[in-house]
Amino acid sequence: MAASVHVCNTLEEKLTILADAAKYDVACTSSGSDRRGKKGSLGNAFSAGICHSFASDGRCISILKILLSNECIYDCKYCLNRRSNDHPRATFTPEEVCTLTVEFYKRNYIEGLFLSSGIVKNPAYTMEQMYRALYLLRTQYHFRGYIHVKTIPGADPEIIERTGYLADRMSTNVELPTREGLETLAPGKTHQKILAPLRQIQSGIGQHRLSQGKSPRLERHQINAHLPGNIFERAQALELEEKSARAMAIMPSSEASFVPAGQSTQMIVGATRENDYQLLMTSQALYQRFDLKRVFYSAYVPLNEDALLPEKDTPVPLLREHRLYQADWLLRYYGFSAEELLSPEKPNFNVLLDPKCDWALRHLEIFPVEVNKASYDLLLKVPGIGVKSAMRIVKARRSGTLDFDGLKRIGVVLKRAKYFITCKGKMMYHIPIEEDFLTRQLTGEDARTTWEMGHPQTYRQLSLFDDMQLVAPPTVEDTKKTLQGQL
């Protein structure tokens, strides 16, 4: 089926189409940049100035998130904008992207821009148009706000590099976690082409930071401790000088830096049959190999009809997406590895439990943990104890012995932690340390939240004029007031 030939002429019409088409790209992060406002310029990317809002489905809406174009030469089966879909197409000019960004910023609607695109004509042409938009924003419009731009695999590395000196964050969508899945659903794409810009941006970030005498890594994830050696040790001084010179030519300011907020990627969850173990192993490899700031997970929304895709009435796996984000957090900040959380024998999370609880129930031999003696690393393994609360425990017990009331004040989530800890050798309640019993207790604690996440369409704004069909027995006070004529 040929794509629609409907041409959009007005800027408002283009915005309606291309803002809606961009909603499946995830960009929910803080800026990570420290470029402040400047007299005679617009906006700033100082982290405190980027205030994020969230839509009902959890997507970030604090930045102007648009596609340069929803035209595309590819026919990826999972994509709404694939060339075989028949719907209106639109393409912004670089100047129109600038106009929208500046006008929305002046009205205090946004603090930055997220720019992605379908592939118009070819990857090189598309990336050049995106670069042109960013170049005009930075130099002609003097826009200093946050910019996140998607790279186009297959584009000229020179254009990707030049774009990196104008953007705060860049990302390249891995799309699917396995080569087999990508070959099946996106025949025009390959992992080799997708990984090339990831590698280029990683190298550019490291080289720029080395040229400034900084650590080549943006942040040291616990997971990266397993890496053999430093991939940036092979950087050449000549390359650093050339890149710095190019940066000065692009941005006539000593502040020029290469992708200061780092790079990220995105994977689709639920379009193919990969299990959670495969997804998490891919994420772990991406963090290790490319020093990513984030891997985003996007629950697949069935929009296209195809024998290789889930049926259109298949529920969106939002709860599974949520569990993967929780597990990703454990990889980055809690010292877990993908192999600890899942295995080929147990390849999927129990969606009724958060991944740390799921792990703890399979390792009951190390519990309960005495909070007044346990190491920091062991405290991080306890459900209900986070990074901040673990640090507070270690600090607080230097001056005294902690009890359960003290833990609650510190910020420990006792509704989960109480099953796995002792204070002064005693548990909060007399609880059997037995997997089936604890599973029932923990799933009961989170049952309502879990159900609501799995049924987002049931959310409804409460009204003073709607009793929501709830029937509650009258209180004694209400009965008295009724008899006395007060109600």
Image (spheres, rainbow, N blue to C red):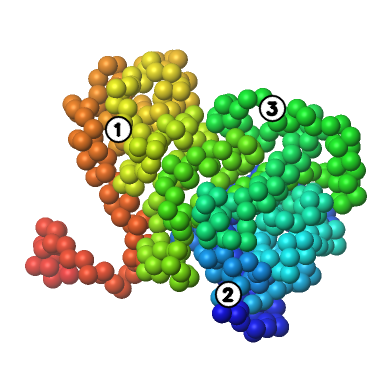
Q: Which mark is residue 77?
A: none
Give the label, 3 or 2, closer to the camera.
Answer: 2
Q: What residue sits 32% from the left and 51% below the top?
A: 450
Q: Secondary structure at mark 1?
A: helix
Task: Give the Cα separation between the discs numbered 1 and 3.
Answer: 36 Å
Name the residue at 29% across, 26% down.
364
The alpha-carbon separation of the residues under discs 3 and 2 comes to 45 Å
Pick whichever of labels 2 and 1 is earlier in the sequence: 2
Of label 3 and label 2, which has the lower sequence position?
A: 2
Helix, strand or loop at mark 2 = loop
Q: Which residue is mark 3?
A: 230
In the rendered view, tell whether residue 2 sits above or below residue 121: below
| Disc 2: which residue | 84
Q: Earlier in the sequence, mark 1 or mark 3?
A: 3
**Residue 361 - label:** 1
- Kind of residue indicated by mark 2: Ser
Compared with 42, 378 (above or below) is above
Q: Nearer the viewer, mark 1 or mark 3?
A: 3
Quadrant hosting residue 84: bottom right
